[in-house]
Image (cartoon, rainbow, N blue to C red):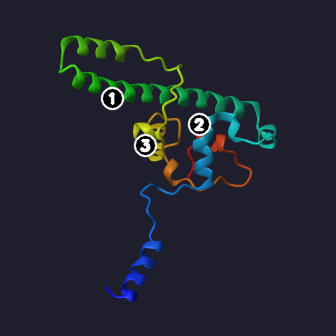
Amino acid sequence: MSKLVFSQRLEDLKKKKFYTEHEFSKYQEKLYKARLLGLKVYSKEEQRRMSLAEKLDIQIKHKATRKIINTWKAQLVNSKANRLMDTLFNHSRVARTVCSLQCKGIDPELKSKVSFSSLGISKNKVMNKLVKEGLLPKNFFYLDKPKKNESMHRIQKNGRI
């Protein structure tokens, strides 16, 4: 291979983007993080300008998001543990009984410390889950940014693009 062809291919590779996930606007990122982290996402100044109703709405949706995420993570961990138990104990009745009892006892308040990446959950999957559960607007993937003087809380309620 000639040096010219090789350098051209190298330049092409440098220009290519090696990600598969959707790029999100700053507004989408902030809305997503507000669901995951609550009021911690906002500066003291932003919190001061918010009404009490907006703050409460953010906290309520954050708590609901945490429950959904914790339950989802627990289900995935249980599923992986069940497969492991089933493999290790060669499909025994005792292993199946333990696995079935394990799935019944999921506590959504118990914070899962397992990371999304270790469970194979991408940011897109989390966002899709939150849209499906109604914690992010149905048009979330099409949102750009709010109009001037319009808060994220009002857009979420009205579902405006």
| Picture layout, residue 83 above or below residue 99 | below
Q: At numbered mark 2, what does the secondary structure look like: helix, strand or loop?
A: helix
Q: Which mark is residue 80?
A: 1
Q: Nearer the viewer, mark 1 or mark 2?
A: 1
Q: Residues within 10 Å of mark 3 (few under 14, many from 20)?
A: few
- Find the distance from the CA under tag 1 to the CA under tag 2: 27 Å
Q: Which residue is more in the foreground, 80 or 108?
A: 80
Residue shown at 51% from the left, 54% from the top? 142
Q: Is residue 41 left or right of residue 85?
A: right
- Pointer 1 with pointer 2, Cβ within 8 A: no
Residue shown at 76% from the left, 35% from the top? 51
Q: Position of residue 28 (x, y in %)?
A: 58, 50
Q: Position of residue 57 (x, y in %)?
A: 65, 31
Q: Which mark is residue 125?
A: 3
Q: Position of residue 16 (x, y in %)?
A: 44, 70
Q: Quadrant of residue 158?
A: top right
Q: Mark 3: which amino acid?
A: Lys
Mark 2 highlights which residue? 35
Q: Mark 2: which amino acid?
A: Arg
Q: At numbered mark 3, what does the secondary structure look like: helix, strand or loop?
A: helix
**Mark nearer the N terminus (1 vs 2):** 2
Q: Position of residue 107 (x, y in %)?
A: 47, 17
Q: Which residue is more in the foreground, 44 or 52?
A: 44
